[in-house]
Amino acid sequence: MEGERGRRSTEAFFGRRKGKTIRPRQAALLDRLLPALLIDLDAPPPPLGNLFGPQVAEVRLEIGFGGGEHFLHESGRHPAVGFIGVEPFVNGMAKFLAAFDEDPRSNIRLYDDDATRLLDWLPSASIASIDLLYPDPWPKKRHWKRRFVNDANLDRFARVLQPGGRFRFASDIDSYVNWTLHACRRHPRFEWQAETAADWRTPYEGWPGTRYEAKAMREGRTPAYLTFLRT
Protein backbone atom coordinates (compact mmCIF):
# COMPACT_ATOMS: atom_id res chain seq x y z
CA MET A 1 0.00 0.00 0.00
CA GLU A 2 1.18 3.51 -0.76
CA GLY A 3 0.57 4.62 2.83
CA GLU A 4 3.06 2.02 4.03
CA ARG A 5 5.65 2.65 1.31
CA GLY A 6 5.53 6.41 1.82
CA ARG A 7 6.13 6.53 5.58
CA ARG A 8 8.42 9.34 6.69
CA SER A 9 10.19 9.98 9.94
CA THR A 10 7.83 11.48 12.46
CA GLU A 11 8.21 13.79 15.41
CA ALA A 12 5.80 12.42 17.93
CA PHE A 13 4.19 9.13 16.91
CA PHE A 14 4.87 6.35 19.41
CA GLY A 15 1.89 4.04 18.82
CA ARG A 16 1.70 0.78 16.93
CA ARG A 17 1.32 0.84 13.16
CA LYS A 18 0.04 -2.73 12.90
CA GLY A 19 -1.64 -5.36 15.04
CA LYS A 20 -2.71 -8.84 14.05
CA THR A 21 -2.61 -9.79 10.39
CA ILE A 22 -5.51 -8.22 8.52
CA ARG A 23 -7.94 -10.40 6.58
CA PRO A 24 -7.80 -10.58 2.78
CA ARG A 25 -11.04 -8.57 2.45
CA GLN A 26 -9.61 -5.85 4.70
CA ALA A 27 -6.42 -5.74 2.64
CA ALA A 28 -8.50 -5.44 -0.52
CA LEU A 29 -10.48 -2.55 0.97
CA LEU A 30 -7.28 -0.75 1.93
CA ASP A 31 -6.01 -1.12 -1.63
CA ARG A 32 -9.31 -0.18 -3.28
CA LEU A 33 -10.74 2.58 -1.09
CA LEU A 34 -7.91 4.24 0.77
CA PRO A 35 -5.96 5.84 -2.11
CA ALA A 36 -8.96 7.90 -3.25
CA LEU A 37 -9.65 9.13 0.30
CA LEU A 38 -6.10 9.93 1.38
CA ILE A 39 -4.90 13.52 1.69
CA ASP A 40 -1.65 14.13 -0.19
CA LEU A 41 0.72 16.18 1.95
CA ASP A 42 3.22 16.43 -0.90
CA ALA A 43 0.89 18.90 -2.61
CA PRO A 44 0.37 22.43 -1.25
CA PRO A 45 -2.77 22.64 0.90
CA PRO A 46 -5.79 23.91 -1.06
CA PRO A 47 -8.73 25.71 0.51
CA LEU A 48 -9.98 22.76 2.51
CA GLY A 49 -13.48 22.93 1.09
CA ASN A 50 -11.96 21.92 -2.25
CA LEU A 51 -11.15 18.50 -0.80
CA PHE A 52 -14.84 17.74 -0.47
CA GLY A 53 -16.93 19.87 -2.81
CA PRO A 54 -19.15 22.94 -2.72
CA GLN A 55 -21.62 21.45 -0.22
CA VAL A 56 -19.13 21.66 2.66
CA ALA A 57 -19.62 24.61 5.01
CA GLU A 58 -16.80 23.78 7.46
CA VAL A 59 -14.15 21.14 8.13
CA ARG A 60 -13.66 19.10 11.29
CA LEU A 61 -10.75 16.88 12.30
CA GLU A 62 -10.67 13.70 14.38
CA ILE A 63 -7.26 12.42 15.46
CA GLY A 64 -6.91 8.70 16.16
CA PHE A 65 -10.42 7.54 15.26
CA GLY A 66 -9.73 3.87 16.06
CA GLY A 67 -12.38 1.74 14.36
CA GLY A 68 -14.21 4.88 13.30
CA GLU A 69 -17.51 4.51 15.18
CA HIS A 70 -17.70 8.16 16.21
CA PHE A 71 -16.10 9.46 13.02
CA LEU A 72 -18.57 7.67 10.73
CA HIS A 73 -21.50 8.57 12.97
CA GLU A 74 -20.67 12.29 12.98
CA SER A 75 -20.06 12.46 9.22
CA GLY A 76 -23.51 10.95 8.70
CA ARG A 77 -25.16 13.41 11.10
CA HIS A 78 -23.57 16.41 9.36
CA PRO A 79 -23.49 15.92 5.58
CA ALA A 80 -22.70 19.61 4.99
CA VAL A 81 -19.49 19.32 7.06
CA GLY A 82 -16.19 17.95 5.76
CA PHE A 83 -14.49 15.43 8.05
CA ILE A 84 -10.79 14.61 8.08
CA GLY A 85 -9.88 11.50 10.05
CA VAL A 86 -6.39 10.46 11.16
CA GLU A 87 -5.58 6.85 12.02
CA PRO A 88 -2.04 5.45 11.61
CA PHE A 89 -3.01 2.01 13.00
CA VAL A 90 -3.62 -0.16 9.93
CA ASN A 91 -6.09 -2.46 11.68
CA GLY A 92 -8.22 0.50 12.80
CA MET A 93 -8.19 1.96 9.31
CA ALA A 94 -9.20 -1.40 7.83
CA LYS A 95 -12.09 -1.69 10.27
CA PHE A 96 -13.28 1.80 9.39
CA LEU A 97 -13.09 1.13 5.66
CA ALA A 98 -15.22 -2.00 6.06
CA ALA A 99 -17.96 0.16 7.61
CA PHE A 100 -17.43 2.92 5.05
CA ASP A 101 -17.79 0.42 2.20
CA GLU A 102 -21.28 -0.40 3.50
CA ASP A 103 -22.22 3.28 3.88
CA PRO A 104 -19.99 5.47 1.66
CA ARG A 105 -20.19 9.26 1.71
CA SER A 106 -18.46 12.16 0.02
CA ASN A 107 -17.65 14.30 3.07
CA ILE A 108 -14.78 12.13 4.39
CA ARG A 109 -11.04 12.35 3.79
CA LEU A 110 -8.36 10.34 5.58
CA TYR A 111 -4.74 10.50 6.67
CA ASP A 112 -2.85 7.39 7.82
CA ASP A 113 0.37 8.78 9.30
CA ASP A 114 1.52 10.98 12.19
CA ALA A 115 -1.10 13.66 12.90
CA THR A 116 1.59 16.26 13.59
CA ARG A 117 2.55 16.20 9.91
CA LEU A 118 -1.05 16.85 8.89
CA LEU A 119 -1.41 19.64 11.45
CA ASP A 120 1.72 21.35 10.12
CA TRP A 121 0.37 21.07 6.55
CA LEU A 122 -3.10 22.45 7.23
CA PRO A 123 -3.72 26.16 6.57
CA SER A 124 -4.05 28.45 9.56
CA ALA A 125 -7.58 28.91 10.94
CA SER A 126 -8.96 26.26 8.58
CA ILE A 127 -10.53 23.80 11.05
CA ALA A 128 -13.78 24.28 12.97
CA SER A 129 -13.17 21.57 15.57
CA ILE A 130 -10.68 18.92 16.64
CA ASP A 131 -11.66 15.71 18.42
CA LEU A 132 -9.11 13.63 20.33
CA LEU A 133 -11.15 10.80 21.82
CA TYR A 134 -9.67 8.08 24.01
CA PRO A 135 -6.08 8.58 22.86
CA ASP A 136 -3.35 6.25 24.07
CA PRO A 137 -2.95 7.31 27.73
CA TRP A 138 0.66 6.15 28.17
CA PRO A 139 -0.16 5.48 31.84
CA LYS A 140 3.40 4.95 33.10
CA LYS A 141 4.88 8.21 34.32
CA ARG A 142 8.10 7.73 32.37
CA HIS A 143 6.00 7.64 29.18
CA TRP A 144 3.86 10.74 29.84
CA LYS A 145 6.04 12.74 27.45
CA ARG A 146 4.61 10.56 24.66
CA ARG A 147 1.06 11.77 25.25
CA PHE A 148 -0.37 13.60 22.27
CA VAL A 149 -1.55 16.50 24.39
CA ASN A 150 1.53 18.65 24.94
CA ASP A 151 2.51 22.28 24.53
CA ALA A 152 3.77 21.84 20.97
CA ASN A 153 0.60 20.11 19.77
CA LEU A 154 -1.65 22.60 21.54
CA ASP A 155 0.23 25.31 19.63
CA ARG A 156 -0.55 23.36 16.46
CA PHE A 157 -4.22 23.11 17.43
CA ALA A 158 -4.36 26.84 18.14
CA ARG A 159 -2.87 27.63 14.74
CA VAL A 160 -5.24 25.50 12.64
CA LEU A 161 -8.43 26.10 14.65
CA GLN A 162 -10.60 29.01 13.70
CA PRO A 163 -11.18 31.60 16.46
CA GLY A 164 -14.04 30.17 18.49
CA GLY A 165 -13.17 26.66 17.25
CA ARG A 166 -13.53 23.69 19.54
CA PHE A 167 -11.11 21.11 20.91
CA ARG A 168 -12.78 18.08 22.48
CA PHE A 169 -10.92 15.49 24.54
CA ALA A 170 -12.42 12.33 26.05
CA SER A 171 -10.67 9.77 28.24
CA ASP A 172 -11.35 7.31 31.04
CA ILE A 173 -7.85 7.72 32.50
CA ASP A 174 -7.90 10.26 35.33
CA SER A 175 -4.21 11.13 35.09
CA TYR A 176 -4.57 11.99 31.38
CA VAL A 177 -7.72 14.02 32.01
CA ASN A 178 -5.89 16.04 34.67
CA TRP A 179 -2.85 16.32 32.40
CA THR A 180 -5.00 17.75 29.59
CA LEU A 181 -6.82 20.13 31.88
CA HIS A 182 -3.56 21.56 33.20
CA ALA A 183 -2.03 21.81 29.72
CA CYS A 184 -5.03 23.57 28.19
CA ARG A 185 -5.68 25.89 31.11
CA ARG A 186 -2.11 27.19 31.03
CA HIS A 187 -2.23 27.66 27.25
CA PRO A 188 -3.21 31.24 26.35
CA ARG A 189 -5.47 30.18 23.46
CA PHE A 190 -7.75 27.62 25.13
CA GLU A 191 -10.65 28.15 27.49
CA TRP A 192 -12.30 25.24 29.29
CA GLN A 193 -16.06 25.14 28.75
CA ALA A 194 -17.33 23.70 32.04
CA GLU A 195 -19.05 25.17 35.07
CA THR A 196 -20.11 22.06 36.99
CA ALA A 197 -18.95 18.44 37.20
CA ALA A 198 -21.96 17.42 35.12
CA ASP A 199 -20.58 19.45 32.22
CA TRP A 200 -17.59 17.16 31.84
CA ARG A 201 -19.21 13.90 32.96
CA THR A 202 -22.01 14.18 30.38
CA PRO A 203 -21.27 12.75 26.90
CA TYR A 204 -21.23 15.11 23.96
CA GLU A 205 -24.48 15.85 22.16
CA GLY A 206 -25.25 13.02 19.73
CA TRP A 207 -22.49 10.86 21.23
CA PRO A 208 -22.79 7.29 19.88
CA GLY A 209 -20.41 5.69 22.38
CA THR A 210 -17.62 3.32 21.42
CA ARG A 211 -16.76 -0.26 22.26
CA TYR A 212 -13.64 0.94 24.04
CA GLU A 213 -15.73 3.28 26.20
CA ALA A 214 -18.21 0.51 27.03
CA LYS A 215 -15.33 -1.73 28.12
CA ALA A 216 -13.89 1.04 30.31
CA MET A 217 -17.24 1.58 32.02
CA ARG A 218 -17.68 -2.17 32.62
CA GLU A 219 -14.29 -2.12 34.31
CA GLY A 220 -15.35 0.75 36.57
CA ARG A 221 -13.60 3.68 34.88
CA THR A 222 -15.66 6.85 34.45
CA PRO A 223 -15.10 8.80 31.23
CA ALA A 224 -14.60 12.54 31.15
CA TYR A 225 -15.63 14.70 28.19
CA LEU A 226 -13.70 17.98 28.06
CA THR A 227 -14.40 20.86 25.69
CA PHE A 228 -12.09 23.83 25.11
CA LEU A 229 -12.68 26.85 22.91
CA ARG A 230 -9.91 28.44 20.90
CA THR A 231 -9.93 32.10 21.95
Image (spheres, rainbow, N blue to C red):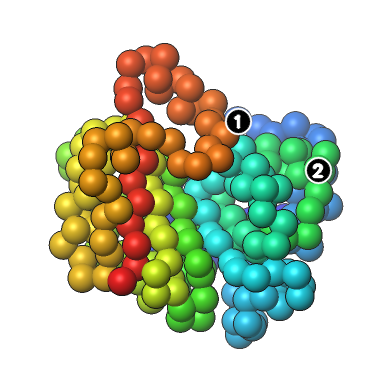
Indicate the position of residue 178 as horizontal and vertical percent values.
20, 43
Indicate the position of residue 132 as horizontal and vertical percent values.
43, 50
Q: Quadrant of the C terminus?
A: bottom left
Q: Amino acid at mark 1?
A: Lys
Q: Earlier in the sequence, mark 1 or mark 2?
A: 1
- Tell me the SS state at disc 1: loop
Q: Residues within 10 Å of mark 1 (few under 14, many from 20)?
A: few
Q: Residues within 10 Å of mark 2 (few under 14, many from 20)?
A: few
- Tell me the SS state at disc 2: loop
Residue 103 is tagged as 2
Residue at 42% over, 66% down = 165
Quadrant housing residue 136: top left
Q: Is residue 90 visible?
A: no
Quadrant housing residue 93: top right
Question: Which residue is most to the front?
Answer: 195
Q: How many marks?
A: 2
**Residue 117, above or below 200:** below
Apparent side of residue 143 relative to residue 120 in the rendered image (left or right): left
Q: Which residue is mark 1?
A: 20
